[in-house]
Each structure stands twice: as structure tokens, then as C-alpha cells.
Amino acid sequence: MTDKPMLILIAGPYRSGTQGDPQAMAAHLARLEAAAWPVFAAGHLPVIGEWIALPVLRSAGAGPTDPLADQVLYPAAERLLAHCDAVLRLPGDSTGADQDVATARRRGLPVYHDAAEIPRRTPRESA
């Protein structure tokens, strides 16, 4: 248990296995987002790299299948991880999520594979 909320990156497939199909990528993003509630309910703050990267891509006039995407998606997650306290790695093949896990481990951050593994936050009582 911890009294400080952690910023937890939810990592898993987004583009992997979609062959660029927008509906398949949307389904992957919905799966990532479905993991946000258990993280939040444990007293922490969930974040997903695509929540940062996709608006950056849109502002550059690009999307997730544009050649620019590799220059935004992976670096956005890398930069975001500099602020995170842990990673929740969802199942499924994903080069980007594997990179996130490797980065987290290099930085000594915990990597969880199930939201039930995440320590519940014990908020301090206000005086």
C-alpha cells in the first residue's frame, strides 16, 4: 500500500495486428482505456501514450498510419515514461508496449501485468 498516487502508463497493442484498419485500432484503444478504471479505482492516475501522441499527430496533419507516426508514438511514450511511476502491460503483441516495459525496467519502475497487482492507495486523512 502507498499513500502517494502513482502515474501508471497503460501499455498494450494499438496499431499491432491491425494492418492500419481504423476500426481495429479504435478497438485496441478502447481495450487500453477499459484498463483505466481499475487503475483509477486503486487510487492512482492512469495514462495512455496514445492520449498524448494522437493529438500531436493530428496537429501535424497526420494520423496513426502516416509515416510520421513512428516519430511521434514511440517518442511520446518514452517522454511520458519519464514522468510515470509504473507500467501496466496488457496482453498482446506490441513492439511499442515492449519498449515501454524495457524502458520502465531500465528506470527501476514496477511493471504490472494485471490491475489486481497494483498496490491500492491508502489516502492520508486530512486534518
Image (cartoon, grey):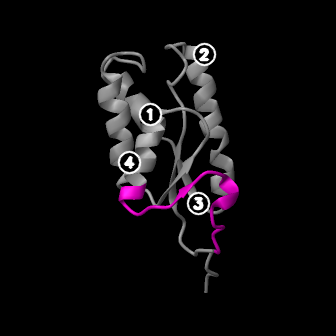
Determine the secondary structure under disc 3.
Answer: loop
Q: Which residues are magenta?
A: 105-122
| Crowd tier of the residue under label 3, counting other residues whose Cα lies within 10 Å: few below 14, some 14–19, many 20 or above | many
Residue occupied by mark 3: 44
Residue 53 position within the rendered picture, expressed as x and y whole percent measured from the top left: 40, 33
Give the spatial CA distance, label 2 vs label 1.
20 Å
Label 3, label 4: how many angstroms apart (C-alpha)?
A: 16 Å
Is residue 78 placed above or below 86 in the rendered structure?
Answer: above
> Dot 2 surroundings within 10 Å: few (below 14), some, or many (20 or more)?
few
Q: CA distance from mark 3 to mark 2?
A: 29 Å
Bin the neighbour count of mark 1 within 10 Å (Cα to Cα): few under 14, some 14-19, many 20 and up.
some
- For mark 4, what is the residue? 80
- Give the distance between the C-alpha atoms of the residues marked 4 and 1, in whole angstroms: 17 Å
List the residue tagged with mark 1. Answer: 95
Residue placed most toward the observer, 103 or 121: 103
Residue 10, percent from left and from top: 54, 45
